[in-house]
Image: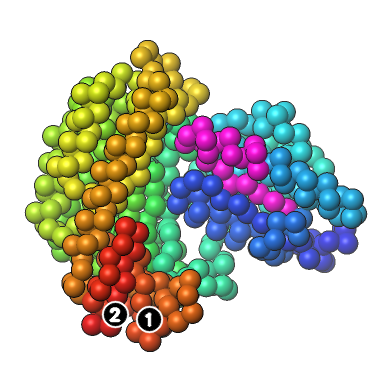
Amino acid sequence: MTNNSDTSGKVVDKKYFVKTYGCQMNVYDSERIGDALEAEGYVVTADMSEADLVLLNTCHIREKAAEKVYSDIGRIKKLKLAREEAGKTMTIGVTGCVAQAEGKEIIRRAPVVDLVAGPQTYHKLPTLVADAVAGKKTVETEFEIENKFTKMPVATRAQTRSRGVAAFLTVQEGCDKFCTFCVVPYTRGSETSRSVGQVIDEAERLAAAGVREITLLGQNVNAWHGLGPSNTEWGLGELLYKLAEVDGIERLRYMTSHPIDMDEGLIAAHGELASLMPYLHLPVQAGSDKILKAMNRHHTRDDYLYVIERMRAVRPDIAISGDFIVGFPGESEADFEETLDIIRQVGYASAFSFKYSPRPGTPGAGMDDQIPADVAGERLQRLQALLNQQQLDFNKNCLDSEMDVLLEKPGKREGQLIARSPYLQSVIVDRSVGSVGDIVRVKITEAAPNSLVGISA
Ligand code: 5AD
Ligand code: SF4
């Protein structure tokens, strides 16, 4: 036993710091990694230079995200050296999708890294971290048959510390769709769903910790399926009905969805379930059938528009959000115009858009007719100008309307609170309207591109 263990063998007085890159799945994973480390006796610190253990929970989706990790490691190395000069240590770990994709190559390129652990290995983190802290360079990127969730400790942090009033809950992980631009099927593995029991159990824990709004997460969240009571197969729609019954959970959302998995049950839930928020993140990526086919999206432009039409039939006010990639190999100016056109037809409340980034090992990276960066950059600017305008229009449309908002956290200015609208907009309100966790009715008095202002209605 070392000085840093108590009689149970647990770590004492050790601090950890997790930096999260990329998507909400990583935000959720970082929380669970925190739970696992705290169960071992680690305490979180907000100051990286104070940390005995620094974990970078990384993203591999685009080259920029992956390269950022290496430049950050360069900076963290200086902190590690400074600690070593002061007689302390710092163990550096890389988790997440860069860890999965690059494995031991990370330690070759950045020898200061002690630990590399892929997203399907987090249930083993306590042992992996202990090995790395003991000075053994540790790399674990195996996919195991069993679901990592069943092996990770339950969300202990939710019982002891507040996660805030809005939380993520991962219900599905991995992807079998193999879009030709995407690394996810390689880094997160094949599609797996968590069981109904596990999801409800975690939702109840979150509710008990004060959570009022849950966003279900998955790379392909609407492909979630599980066995319900009496062994019937449930889809995400049924799961949402069940979650709506959990005491204390007032609002539900889910992301990210694939158009071909928007089934009737899920669409109907949007018309019937009051706690299911009128917001849908449904990426189309591109508007031309030629590019959709090259991307292996399994749907056409019209299929997508038909889903939107059915969603609006059951929930006319629904806010539609999406992801777009410009400059996919073979994209002509006419193909790109079709993307602008589908954006005009749908009318997005918000969106994420990216320049295509060839990822090693994906079919897209080897395709002929790669688009020059300057052409893609110019297209991205035009696309974003349109999307920004649509977002502002959507927000302006809310002026003078009344809506129920969830008070989430203190605002930047004294006396303000930040609330969340049903359409996922940030709404700035005066503190006098209620307390964090309340859902209050407000009237919208101002609308800017990224936020609204509301007063008590
Ligand atoms: N290049 C650019 N954008 C990508 N995305 C996924 N892979 C790539 C890539 N290689 C985008 C897609 C996806 C979002 C999470 O990231 O739009 O929906
Ligand atoms: Fe990637 Fe396509 Fe799967 Fe989404 S559906 S995670 S874009 S492969």
- Residue 455 is marked as 2
- Residue 430 is marked as 1
Image x and y of residue 431, in percent: 40, 83
The residue sitting at the left extreme is 313
The question of residue 274 being in magenta is answered with no
Q: Tag 1, which secondary structure?
A: strand
Q: Is residue 224 visible?
A: no
Q: Which residues are magenta?
A: 53-72
In the rendered image, the vertical position of residue 50 relative to residue 288, given as above or below:
below
Q: Amino acid at mark 2?
A: Ile
Q: Earlier in the sequence, mark 2 or mark 1?
A: 1
The question of residue 58 being in magenta is answered with yes
Tell me what residue is drawn at x 17 percent, y 33 percent.
301
Displayed quadrant of residue 376: top left
The residue sitting at the top extreme is 368
In the rendered image, the vertical position of residue 273 relative to residue 124, given as above or below:
below
Q: Amino acid at mark 1?
A: Asp
Circle 2/circle 1 CB separation < 8 Å: yes
Tell me what residue is drawn at x 70 percent, y 29 percent.
109
